Amino acid sequence: MTEPCEPLLRVENLTRRFPGVVALNDVSLAVAPGEVHVLLGENGAGKSTLIKILAGVQPPSSGQMMLEGRPVSFASPREAKEAGVSTVFQELSLVPTLTVTENLFLGRLPTRGGLVTRRGLPALAKEALDRVGAEVRLDARVGSLPRSAQQLVEIAKGLMGSAKLLILDEPTASLGDRESDQLLALVKKLSAEGVSVIYITHRLKEIAQIGHRVTVLRDGNYVGGLGPDDEIHDNNRLVELMTGRKPEKLYPRSPRSTGEERLVLQELHAAPDVNGVTMEFRAGEIVGIAGLLGSGKSSVGQACFGLSRVTGGKVVIDGTEVTRITPTMALRRGLVYYPSDRKRQGLALVRPMYANITLGSLGPAGVARFGMVNRRKEQATARAHVKRVNIRPGDVNRRAELFSGGNQQKAVLARGLLHDADIHIFDEPTVGIDVNAKADVYRVMDDLAQAGKAVVLISSDLPEILGMSDRVYVMHDGRVAAHLEGEAITEGSVLASFFGSKTNDREIKV
Ligand SMILES: Nc1ncnc2c1ncn2[C@@H]1O[C@H](COP(=O)(O)OP(=O)(O)OP(=O)(O)O)[C@@H](O)[C@H]1O
Ligand SMILES: [Mg+2]
C-alpha cells in the first residue's frame, strides 16, 4: 500500500489569502497511493480551504499541485473529477427537490440525441448506493431524507466514476455510530483497493481507526505531520499540536440543583418517527436524549419547538398545554431549540454574521423598539455573543458563508443564547466543532443548568451524553427504551438500550 513510490498527490507551498485573512500559508504535503491522509485542525484552521483548492473550487494565491508527478490546476470540481479527484464537501451539494437518482447523475446524465437515456440508471444508482451502504429509495426526494442519508448519497455520488483520490470533508459529522462505522469501513476498503483518501474529521478516535498519516494545520500554517511510524493514536499529542496547548477538561460539572418541572411530554406522537414518548425536564438539570439515527430523538426536540407535526399526546410547558406550538410561540414561552442542521434550519448564509445571530430575536434582546432596528445596538449584541461562543474571526459584518463550518455551527448556538429562555433544547450541538470549541459549548450548557435552566441534550455522541447528563432517556424506534439516572448512566447501559429495551423484548415474546 504505502510503498516508498511516487506520491499520488504532492502539494507544494500552497497559500490562499482572503481580505483580512490568510486562510492557508505555505502548506506542503504528499499523499501516497492508497494512503488515508487525515487533515486535522481547529475550526478555521484552513482545512476546507485546502481541499477546495485541490478540488478546483477556488484557485490558490500561490503554490502548486502535482498529480502523479504532473503539475495540475483544476478550474472546476468537474475538471478535478475527470482527473480522478473526487470531493465530498462539508456543505452538501445535493438538490433537495430532485430524486436520489437524479442527484446521482446530475450534470452527467448519459444523453442520446439530446434526450436523456434513463435505461440502466437505476441499476447504476443502486450499485453506487450499495457501495456506501445507503438504504434509500431511488425515487425519494433528497430533501425528504434525513441528513445522514443525504450524506451517504453525496458520498455515493463522489465515488461514481473512477476516483484515484477521494476527499471527504467531515463525512461522519452528521452520522450516527453505525453509519460512521460503515463509512470508515468503506474508506478502509477503498484504501486497500489503492484509492487515496484525504479525510477531514474532528473525531480523533477515527484517526486511529483509518489514518495512515496526519497533517495538522493551525491558523493556516502547517504545524506538524505524523506518519505511519509515529504515534498517531496519541490524542493528547494531536490536541496539543492542533491547539498549541494541553487538552482542557472537556466536561465541566458545577453543582446543580434540580427545580420544578419545566417541560413535560405525555405520550407524544410526532412526525415522522415519534411513537409515544413520555419525558419530563426540570429546571437546573441537563437531560440527555440518546439513540441511533432514526430513533426519533431529533424529532422530539423539533416537535417541542413546532418544527415537527404532533399527531398525538401532549406537550406541556410550565403547566400549560402547548401541543400545537409554533416556533414563535415556543420562544415566547421561554423554549429555544438549537437545530443541528445549520444550512437547512439554521443560517441565512448570504447575510452578515450579526444579522444571523440577532435574527428573530430583536424584541427579546431589546434591540428593536417600535418596529425599528437599531443597527449599532444589533451589532453590539451580536458581538457580545460572538465572544461568548468564541466565533472566529470576530468580525460580525462578514457574511455567514465566509466563516468556516465549525464557526457557522457556533453562530446557531449564539443565536439561541440570545433568547433568555428557561428551556434550552440542543440538537447535536457539537457536530463539526473542534475540541476546544466543544469545551466552550459544554461550559455554556453547564452555566445554563447552574443558572436554573432546563437543558436538553439530544446527541449521537455517546461520550458527550455520558459526560454531561444528569439523566438520560435512550430512545429506540420512537419510544423511550430506557431512563437512566446518576450512576446508572454508563456506556454499557446506554448502548444496551440502543436496540430496544429488555422489557420490550419480554413483552413481545409473551
Ligand atoms: N471565501 C472566503 N472569504 C473570506 N474568508 C474565508 C473564505 N473562506 C474561508 N475563509 C476564512 O479562512 C479561514 C479558514 O477557513 P476554513 O473553512 O478553511 O476552515 P476549516 O479548517 O475548514 O474549519 P472548520 O473545522 O470550522 O470547518 C477562516 O478564517 C475562514 O473564515
Ligand atoms: Mg471546514
Image: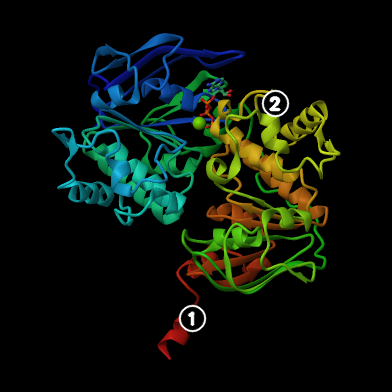
Check disc 2 and report its element: helix, strand or loop.
loop
Q: Which residue is mark 2?
A: 396
Asked whether, in this view, residue 337 is left or right of residue 311, the answer is: right
Crowding near the residue tagged with mark 2, few <14, some 14–19, many ≥20 C-alpha atoms within 10 Å = many
Locate the N terminus by quadrant.
Answer: top left
Residue type (three-letter) at the residue carrying disc 1: Asn
Residue 62, given in percent of the width and then of the height, sits at: 44, 8
Give the mark nearer the N terminus: 2 vs 1.
2
The residue indicated by pointer 1 is: 504
Q: Please, is residue 42 above or below residue 465 in the view?
A: above
In the image, residue 415 above or below residue 316:
above
Mark pair 2, 1: CA separation: 51 Å
Circle nearer the viewer, 2 or 1: 2
- Left or right of 65? Residue 27 is right
Residue at image position (71%, 53%) is 328
Q: Residue, x 56% and y 33% (percent of image)?
A: 239
Q: Is residue 120 left or right of residue 469?
A: left
Say which element carries label 1. Answer: helix
Which residue extends farthest bottom? 510
Labelled pair 2, 1 in contact (Cβ < 8 Å)? no
State whether residue 263 is above or below residue 384: below
Tell me where residue 4 appears, x and y as whole percent.
Answer: 25, 22
Question: In the rendered image, which quarter contains the C terminus?
Answer: bottom left
